[in-house]
Amino acid sequence: MKIVTTETISGHEIIEVIGYVKGSTIQTKHVGRDITAALKGIVGGEIKGYNEMMIEARKLAIHRMVEEAKELGANAIVGMRLQTSTVMGAAAEVIAYGTAVVVR
């Protein structure tokens, strides 16, 4: 599955536009990560626990988007975007979305 953030894929012709596809996940904070984050807020530095959590969340959201595109018969996704939002105080949602297409 080809995934690009552009509207076209260089060297390929879009022969069918299938439509909007998305994948999402909601991740919650872990108590250990919260303690580490609070300490990092005082002394500064990267919060590795949150970084790892968000990397995994992005991977899962993209995987779910790809699975939806495959089910619809697509072999590529154009215009892919990632978006993050806070669902509640202790949870964040990551959404991957784009347009499923068939390319040649």
Image: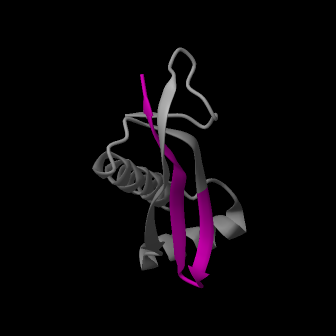
Percent x, y for residue 60? 38, 55
Q: Quadrant of the N terminus?
A: top left
Whether the magenta-drawn stretch holds residue 89 is answered as yes
Q: Nearer the viewer, residue 92 or 46?
A: 92
Percent x, y for residue 15? 47, 30
Q: Is residue 29 above or below residue 65?
A: below
Whether the magenta-drawn stretch holds residue 14 is answered as no
Q: Is residue 88 above or below residue 3?
A: below
> Farthest bottom residue?
88
Magenta part, dominant SS: strand
Percent x, y for residue 33? 48, 70
Percent x, y for residue 67? 32, 51
**Which stretch is magenta?**
83-104
Q: Nearer the viewer, residue 104 or 78?
A: 104
Q: Nearer the viewer, residue 96 or 28?
A: 96
Q: Is residue 12 above or below residue 15?
A: above
Q: Quadrant of the C terminus?
A: top left
| Residue at horizontal 51 percent and vertical 22 percent from the top | 13
| Residue at horizontal 32 percent and vertical 43 percent from the top | 73
Q: Is residue 54 left or right of residue 37?
A: left
Q: Nearer the viewer, residue 22 or 42?
A: 22
